[in-house]
């Protein structure tokens, strides 16, 4: 299966939107799973930058959005 840069960006944006759906208790099973999902999202973002599929400006914008969303949805 060949995936394009746009496929990765779509998956990344879908993941961010999923995180925006509500608060997650980081100590619950759902919070634990969400932590893995966040790791994959950040990893995808770093890979896109490292392989020069996105610019530093695009990376900074997506990273900021992902980080803001992570802080907003994860609670103690």
Image (cartoon, rainbow, N blue to C red):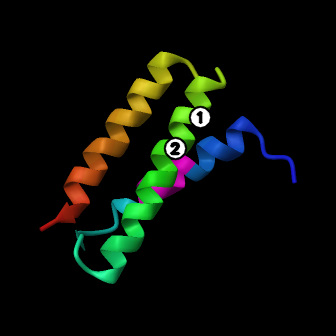
* Horizontal side, residue 62 vs residue 73: left or right: right
Note whether residue 21 is visible: yes
Horizontal and vertical percent position of residue 39:
44, 53
- Indicate the secondary structure of the residue bearing disc 2: helix
- Indicate the secondary structure of the residue bearing disc 1: helix
Q: Relative to residue 30, is residue 13 depicted above or below? A: above
Quadrant in the rendering for residue 28: bottom left
* Horizontal side, residue 27 vs residue 4: left or right: left
Q: Are marks 1 and 2 in contact (CB under 8 Å)?
A: yes
Horizontal and vertical percent position of residue 56:
48, 17
- Which residue in the structure is indicated by mark 1? 47
> Residue drawn at (70%, 36%), measured in percent from left and top?
5
- Which residue in the structure is indicated by mark 2? 43
Q: Residue furthest left?
A: 76
> Residue drawn at (69%, 39%), measured in percent from left and top?
6
Horizontal and vertical percent position of residue 35:
37, 63
Question: Which stretch is magenta?
Answer: 12-17
> Residue drawn at (24%, 61%), measured in percent from left and top?
73
Q: Residue furthest right?
A: 1
> Residue drawn at (15%, 65%), measured in percent from left and top?
75
């Amino acid at each position: 299966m060949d995936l394009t840069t746009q496929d990765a960006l779509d998956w990344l944006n879908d993941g961010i939107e999923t995180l925006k759906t509500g608060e997650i208790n980081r100590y619950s099973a759902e919070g634990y799973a969400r932590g893995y999902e966040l790791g994959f999202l950040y990893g995808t973002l770093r890979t896109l930058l490292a392989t020069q599929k996105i610019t530093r400006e695009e990376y900074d914008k997506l990273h900021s959005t992902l980080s803001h969303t992570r802080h907003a949805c994860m609670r103690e």
